[in-house]
Amino acid sequence: MKPYRKFKPFQIRWAERMGEDKENPYLIRWTFILFNYSIRIHHWLGSDESRYFHDHPWAFFSILIRGSYANVTPNGSKEVSAPFIWHSKATDRHYLDIPPSGAWTILLCGKPSHKWGFFVDGKRYRPLAFFHKFKGAKANTDPVNNVKVI
């Protein structure tokens, strides 16, 4: 049985470095959580895992405040530049393709409705299982040749 971890109703997470290499993260984020709602500031230095789509645990508004990126979904890719605002349902599948110049975003997130995951050949994988099974190779190590859209 997995241990149960209860989250505090108020949290601040400061400058979390995301990715396998903490010295070379693909994302640095600042998170403010209040009663399951959150505001997240993201400094994108590289792309999301782009071999497969993922969803999120909550619906959100994303405000692109600096830079640009492509939001890639099963229906295609949309390139946007700051300033830009878009909305996503928790169940929407996507990944972000970040150019070398990077991007800054602010996310306004609703209450979590489910756990997030990656979708591979019709199966949903939780993040730790996904990165363990698929070795966590980040697409941003070779963004031109390492993109697979299913």
Image (spheres, rainbow, N blue to C red):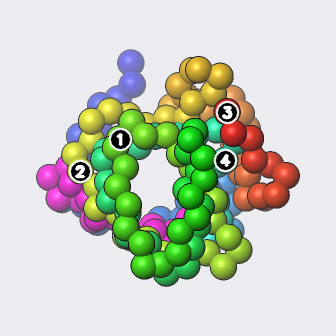
Q: Is residue 58 magenta?
A: no
State yes or no: discs 2 and 1 in contact (Cβ < 8 Å): yes
Q: Residue type at mark 1?
A: Ala
- The earlier-in-sequence mark between 4 and 2 is 4
Element carrying mark 2: loop
Q: Is residue 36 magenta?
A: yes
Say which element carries label 3: loop
Whichever of callouts 1 and 3 sits on the residue coming sooner in the sequence is 1
Q: Residues within 10 Å of mark 3 (few under 14, many from 20)?
A: few
Residue 71 is drawn in which quadrant?
Answer: bottom right
Span highlighted in magenta in the image: 27-43
Q: CA distance from mark 2 to mark 1?
A: 9 Å
Note whether residue 23 is visible.
no
Residue 104 is tagged as none
Q: Is residue 93 above or below residue 36?
A: above
Residue 50, numbered label: 4
Q: What residue is rendered at 64% in x and 48% in y?
A: 49
The answer to whether the residues at label 4 and label 2 have Cβ atoms under 8 Å apart is no
Query: Decide: marks 4, 3 in contact (CB < 8 A)?
Result: no
Q: Badge 1 is on which residue?
A: 90
Dot 2 amino acid type: Gly
Inspect the image, locate mark 3, and give the three-letter code of the amino acid beneath it: Ile
Task: Please tell me which of labels 4 and 3 falls first in the chain.
Answer: 4
The reply to whether callout 2 and callout 3 are in contact (CB within 8 Å) is: no
Which residue bears the numbered disc 2? 110
